[in-house]
């Protein structure tokens, strides 16, 4: 069982709902913001405040994603998708010799799981997931104003290698070796309510790496916090640092 599958199982065990077919999934009634199960149990509750540093944690969110996709032979459509994402958030840090506070901090997180699903009149059912074998994550870093002082609103980037399962195409397509970058400005971590967007177009390839279309645009909105599980001190891996922290 992969690391992501283990994490999903742990999350589901903390609050589940049983569907009519007997399947189990995170229950929005049993697992909500402020619920002991969602926040790691008694003594682990903490408010999410703007401009405040928070310790490392494993966190699961509801997410909404909107993608504008063009597929050769099928057409073009904008698809709304909904589902869940899981991040492992690392220790915040500041540059050498600089006091660690919100404005001076760099915060990174590893993107463990993304699973969203939607329906398109053009493509049929569409599922989007991440690629756990590749370094994926998010980075928030100090953001200077024009006069050089650090602003409380910080730049945030999310890097992901998405995979698109398109029913009418009958296969999964991807962006190859090109990471998809989404950008936003945030005032708190975790960034509840944040919407990050792409600013470039990305070619799509089939399983044999033949071009089959294009991801024209995408945005992802972070919704409700389902689970907050405090974890011991965690630092970013070298592979993920190469993606997120390079100039």
Image: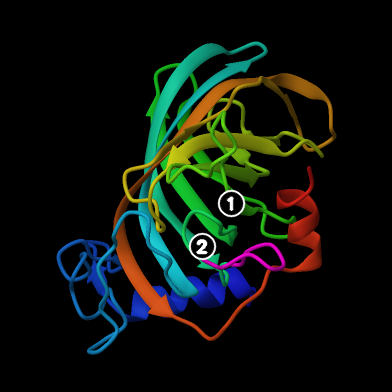
Q: At x 25% / y 68%, what residue is drawn?
A: 47
Q: Quadrant of residue 247?
A: top right
CB within 8 Å, label 1 to label 2? yes
Residue 87: image location, x then y, percent: 51, 62
Q: Is residue 66 above or below residue 10?
A: above
Q: Is residue 147 visible?
A: yes
Q: Can residue 24 be seen?
A: no
Q: Position of residue 34 (x, y in %)?
A: 18, 70
| Mark 2 surroundings within 10 Å by alpha-carbon count, few (fewer than 14), some (14 through 19), many (20 or more) | many
User: At 51% from the left edge and 52% from the top edge, which residue is drawn?
Assistant: 114
Residue at the extreme bottom of the image, as rendered: 42
Q: Nearer the viewer, mark 1 or mark 2?
A: 1
Note whether 78 is above or below 226 in the view shown.
above
Magenta run includes residue 97: yes
Q: Distance from label 1 to label 2 (Cα)?
A: 9 Å
Instruction: Name the residue located 55 percent from the left edge and 71 percent from the top edge.
Output: 5
- Farthest residue toward the left? 29
- Disc 1 marks which residue? 138
Residue behind mark 2: 87
Query: Residue 215 location in percent, x, y?
Result: 62, 23
Residue 25: which quarter of the image? bottom left
Q: Position of residue 9 (x, y in %)?
A: 45, 76
Q: Is residue 103 left or right of residue 84?
A: right
Label 2 element class: strand
Q: Residues within 10 Å of mark 1 (few under 14, many from 20)?
A: many
Q: Inspect the magenta stretch and tell me whether residue 225 lies in it.
A: no
Segment colored magenta: 93-100
């Amino acid at each position: 069982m992969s690391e992501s599958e283990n994490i999903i199982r742990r999350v589901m065990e903390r609050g589940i709902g049983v569907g009519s077919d007997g399947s189990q999934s995170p229950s929005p009634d049993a697992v909500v913001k402020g619920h002991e199960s969602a926040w790691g149990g008694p003594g682990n509750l903490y408010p999410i405040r703007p401009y405040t540093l928070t310790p490392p944690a494993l966190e699961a969110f509801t997410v909404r994603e909107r993608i504008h996709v063009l597929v050769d032979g099928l057409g073009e459509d904008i698809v709304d998708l909904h589902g869940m994402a899981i991040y492992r958030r690392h220790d915040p840090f500041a540059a050498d010799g600089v006091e660690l506070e919100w404005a001076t901090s760099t915060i990174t997180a590893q993107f463990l799981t993304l699973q969203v699903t939607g329906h398109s009149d053009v493509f049929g059912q569409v599922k989007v997931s991440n690629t756990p074998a590749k370094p994926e994550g998010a980075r928030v870093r100090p953001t200077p104003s024009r006069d050089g002082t650090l602003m409380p609103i910080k730049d945030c980037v999310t890097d992901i290698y998405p995979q698109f399962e398109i029913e009418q195409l009958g296969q999964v397509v991807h962006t190859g070796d090109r990471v998809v970058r989404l950008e936003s400005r945030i005032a708190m971590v975790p960034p509840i309510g944040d919407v990050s967007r792409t600013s470039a177009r990305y070619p799509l390839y089939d399983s044999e790496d033949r071009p089959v279309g294009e991801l024209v645009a995408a945005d992802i909105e972070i919704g409700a916090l389902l689970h907050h599980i405090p974890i011991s001190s965690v630092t970013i891996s070298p592979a993920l640092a190469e993606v997120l922290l390079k100039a």
